Amino acid sequence: MAFNAKHLLGIELLSVDQIRLILETANTFREISTRSIKKVPTLRGKTIINLFFESSTRTRTSFEIAAKRLSADAINISTSTSSIVKGETLIDTARNLEAMAPDAIVIRHSSAGAPHQLAKFCSASIINAGDGFHEHPTQALLDALTILDHRPSLKDLRVAIIGDIAHSRVARSNCLLLGKMGAHITVCGPPTLLPINFDQYSSLAGSLTVTDNMNKALDQADVVMMLRIQLERQKEAFFPSIREYFRYYGLTGERMKFAKPGAIIMHPGPINRGVEIASEVADGPYSVILGQVASGVGIRMAILYLVIGEREQTGLGIES
Ligand code: CP
């Protein structure tokens, strides 16, 4: 099957077959990261610009590593060192970068829809690395790849997503992806951090339940996905104190007794220990948090290959 999409703007726009193709391609590409020489010529001669208007450790680094493992040239631009600080608009910045003929622009921006705007103005492929509260598609894809390392299928899996749902693009992309793949999702957080009409992210094939009761959300869960409190996106106090928040919504070993035995624990990072998750579970035997980070490289290799590589070649070009 061909990917047949120039951009990756969100999970909402992907079909189940496209999601499967990304996961299968990522699974194949992951092997390259285990070699002593971690480089193949698949995207030689391609140029990828990482344009990050918000801070990032995992996403930006793994897009850069992914590009380099595929022999593409990767250039990183951050807001503080670019002419954006002199007042240049997003579209002008993108048009100027376009004049240098990149093949793909990876963008993270605090405004929902910024990558979609760029896609209208640019001829390069646009990849959404997180836009405001809206979507973080590569995070949901790497989460799915990680779950499949531990479970045979996403279908009928019970997934609890707990924390600051209101401000989380990760929650939205995961609900869309896991729902399309037939999982049963429960989102949970304090009532003030549960958006109205969140069931619009309900799936085609699975189900979506919303609750403010953490024990109910954890009940018989196969996967527990914890989310950070996004203080940088909050303009008011949504809960009385961190201590209070941890008491009702912090994941501890004791609380994990409500989940299925052996349930895996996920977190997109960065984690706030003692706020949404206790160190005993973040570092415990059922945590797959660092596995998620490792999966990110394979997923981003797959995305870069599928949006800018596939049209010009057959095969993955990864023979060692
Ligand atoms: N998960 C995630 O997006 O992490 P970064 O903000 O470090 O990229």
Image (cartoon, rainbow, N blue to C red):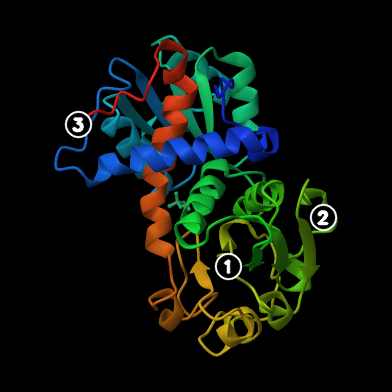
Q: Is residue 18 left or right of residue 93?
A: right
Measure the C-alpha gap from mark 2 to mark 1: 20 Å
Q: Residue at x 37, y 21 (%)?
A: 315
Horizontal and vertical percent position of residue 129: 51, 39
Viewer-side residue, 97 vs 179 = 179
Question: Vertically, is 310 above or below 237?
Answer: above
> Which residue is farthest right?
197
Distance in Å between CA atoms under marks 3 and 2: 46 Å
Q: Between residues 300 and 181, which one lies in front from this camera angle?
A: 181
Provide residue 138's location: percent of width, then percent of height: 52, 42
Q: Could you give the CA–CA distance between mark 3 and mark 1, rounded to whole angstroms?
A: 35 Å
| Image location (x, y in percent) of residue 39 | 22, 32
Query: Would you name the residue on which mark 1 appears?
Result: 223
For the C terminus, the image quarter is: top left
The x, y position of residue 317, in whole percent, is 30, 23
Q: Which residue is mark 2?
A: 199
Residue 207 lies left or right of residue 263; in this view the side is right
Closer to us: 130 or 312? 312
At mark 3, the secondary structure is loop
First in sequence: mark 2 vs mark 1: 2
Disc 3 crowd, CA 10 A, few/some/many (<14, 14-19, 20+): few
Q: Please say if 302 is above or below 278.
A: above
- Mark 3: amino acid: Ser
Q: Is residue 79 visible?
A: no
Q: Which residue carries the number 3 mark? A: 320
The kind of residue tagged 2 is Asp
Q: Pick whichever, 185 or 137, lies toward us.
A: 185
The reply, left or right, for residue 215 in relation to residue 73 is right
